[in-house]
Amino acid sequence: MDAVTKQTADRMTASRCLIIKIGSALLVDDTTGEIRTDWLIGLGADIARLKARGVNVVIVSSGAIAVGRTHLGLKAGALALEQKQAAAATGQIRLAHAWQETLAAHDITVAQILLTPSDTEERRRHLNARATIETLLEMGAVPVINENDSVATEEIRYGDNDRLAARVAQMISADTLVLLSDVDGLYRADPRLDATAELIAEVAEITPEIEAMAGTAPAGYSSGGMVTKLDAAKIATTAGCAMVITDGKPRDALTRLEGGARCTWFLPSSEPMTARKRWIAAAVDTAGAITIDDGAVAALRVGKSLLPAGVTQVDGTFDRGDAIAVKTLDGRIAGRGLSAYSSSDARLIMGRKSRDIENILGYRGRDEMIHRNDLVTELSAAGAPEE
């Protein structure tokens, strides 16, 4: 095994949370419009092997429109928006059923989630979607995600699942995004036109030279192409998630990738959680503040979440998902984070035990005021807030 092959195998083996994006060209036969059942069964076996190893797997699956148009009798060629939405509504049922049957053979539960760009970009909807996905993963299920094509308009669509997959990877702090494609990576020239084109095994930075290597999307069901894959790589790597493009045509594409198959890796500059916390610390303005007692300060110092019991005061007006400052009793900044509650609800539950939240608010929210994954502290090793 050469160094490049071993590096690919090691990266896949080390991945604990994997996003797998599958395009229509792989999943749907472009002649019959039917799902490639044999191919899907092979991929299902690969996913089962990952799950057995303790890897969290999220699937971003295209194919609803491609499957639905066949069953509605829509002819080949461009579709009007309302025809696309009708095809998506029909095809999504068949697509979800195919995934359910495939993974049920391995005793794996499938959950369907339909997203639009605003679900991944608007803070409150982002948090709701993230909480749903993370809960499903904790319960051992495999979320199967697609863009909500049946309701989204052209102005509010991603238009491809490469970028949607990258947004999902960003949302849940995944460590690896696998794009199963009809090519095995990024080439210096279009391999369909130039048989001598060189595969780039690793991209540490997406430069203008790298962007210039992207060609046009192939004809057929694909709406992406290498341009959207590079866009996805920018999103994923900025969020601390590695991305890999590999040939998805073999039934055991993931097993082959773990064995060191040809591919292109796009490398992040930091770990997913580091990237997320850097965003919270530097890129988000605070909408309010909470004051915490000395016990809560000590908990934050050792990396714990902030519970309502440790909050003594709530200042300002903010919504769930807004960034807020965390202060000590003497007014110094201890950190900042994304609040799990609005300011009005935070005032009602501050100083109270997490088990009392449902009785106070009438609904069961999170146990934490700010979860540790959404919290950046500014505490010295000695435990006092830094000046």
Image: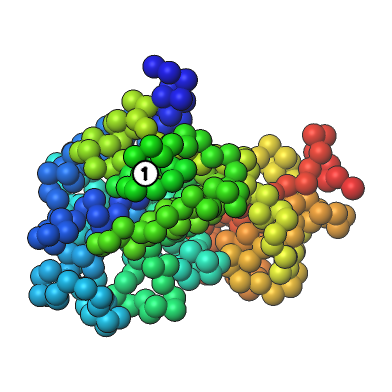
User: Which of the 4 image quadrants contains residue 260?
Assistant: top left
User: Which of the 4 image quadrants contains residue 317?
Assistant: bottom right
Q: Is residue 278 left or right of residue 169?
A: right
Q: Looking at the image, which residue is at 38% across and 79% down?
A: 153
At mark 1, the secondary structure is loop
Q: Position of residue 64 (x, y in %)?
A: 23, 64
Residue 189 visible here:
yes
Instruction: Give the residue type that dot 1 points to.
Output: Asp
Choose between 299 and 224: the one closer to the eye: 224
Q: Looking at the image, which residue is at 73% across and 55% down?
A: 282
Q: Position of residue 242 (x, y in %)?
A: 50, 41
Q: Looking at the image, which residue is at 47% across and 34% down?
A: 201
Q: Is residue 104 left or right of residue 266?
A: left
Q: Looking at the image, which residue is at 86% across and 57% down?
A: 331
- Vertical order, 384 against 126 (above or below): above
- Vertical order, 260 against 345 (above or below): above
Label 1: few (<14), some (14–19) or many (≥20) C-alpha neighbours in 10 Å: few
Q: Position of residue 335 (x, y in %)?
A: 75, 52
Choose between 72 and 315: the one closer to the eye: 72
Question: Label 1: which residue?
Answer: 194
Residue 311 visible here:
no
Q: Position of residue 32 (x, y in %)?
A: 9, 60
How many numbered marks does the figure carry? Answer: 1
